[in-house]
């Protein structure tokens, strides 16, 4: 059973309305406040000691957030696999395109591209692994086996991974442009 009540026009209250929602599971409290045109909703997770009396383990909003983060991790990993395959194809293309003698400048650019392809393959591998470990931690959070604390710790880590992913995307785009320019130049 839950309580849902309003306190309209209370004489000494700062807020015009205050609603408190306590779900039967006792896993969180939801407090909605309204003052003039400003509304706020606070969702507070209750300590684990209170959760043991509950049939629900998690706040559905947190589970939804975790599901969203997990889907995003899966999308990133799929895209990183695709980038890995693309870089391997670029390495093969370099070997095929450069079947004639190159000038010193072209040789230098070729070595630079080969090094960059190798470095970015390592970066893709490392980021893919970090995303996979983060996804596992999210799964542990859903199952209740993680003490890391959600959403603060997990969401900030997720945001860091997102920034790393975006940075890698930019780097790969620049590498792709350099590669295409080189292949056009030597072909």
Image (tube, rainbow, N blue to C red):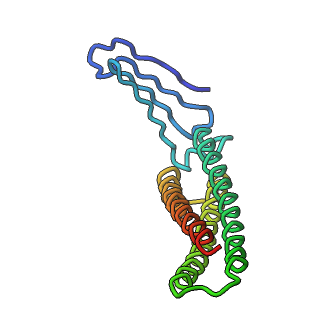
Name the residue rendered at 44%, 31% in the picture. Answer: 41
The spot of residue 40 in percent (x, y) is: 41, 29
In the drawing, does residue 36 fall left or right of residue 99?
left
Name the residue rendered at 55%, 86% in the picture. Answer: 103
Q: Nearer the viewer, residue 61 or 109?
A: 109
Query: The N terminus lies in which quarter of the figure?
Result: top right
The spot of residue 129 in percent (x, y) is: 63, 69
In the drawing, does residue 82 fall left or right of residue 166?
right
Query: Would you place residue 69 above or below residue 140 in this image?
Result: above
The spot of residue 121 in percent (x, y) is: 62, 73
Name the residue rendered at 68%, 55% in the picture. Answer: 74
Q: Nearer the viewer, residue 150 or 106?
A: 106
Name which quarter of the figure residue 78 lies in. bottom right
Query: The C terminus lies in which quarter of the figure?
Result: bottom right
Q: Nearer the viewer, residue 125 or 16?
A: 125
Name which quarter of the figure residue 31 lies in. top left
Name the residue rendered at 48%, 37% in the picture. Answer: 43
The spot of residue 119 in percent (x, y) is: 57, 77
């Amino acid at each position: 059973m839950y309580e849902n009540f309003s306190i309209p026009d209370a004489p000494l209250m700062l807020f015009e309305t205050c609603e408190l929602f306590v779900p039967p599971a006792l896993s969180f409290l939801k407090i909605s406040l309204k003052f003039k045109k400003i509304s706020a909703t606070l969702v507070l997770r209750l300590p684990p000691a209170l959760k043991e009396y509950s049939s629900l383990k998690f706040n559905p909003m947190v589970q939804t957030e975790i599901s969203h983060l997990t889907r995003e991790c899966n999308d990133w990993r799929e895209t990183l696999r695709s980038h890995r395959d693309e870089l391997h194809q670029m390495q093969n293309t370099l070997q095929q395109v450069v079947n004639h003698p190159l000038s010193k400048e072209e040789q230098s650019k070729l070595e630079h591209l080969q090094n960059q392809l190798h470095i970015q393959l390592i970066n893709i591998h490392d980021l893919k692994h970090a995303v996979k470990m983060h996804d596992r931690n999210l799964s542990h959070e859903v199952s209740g086996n993680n003490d890391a604390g959600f959403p603060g710790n997990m969401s900030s880590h997720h945001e860091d991974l997102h920034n790393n992913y975006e940075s890698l995307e930019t780097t790969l785009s620049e590498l792709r442009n350099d590669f295409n320019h080189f292949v056009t130049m030597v072909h």
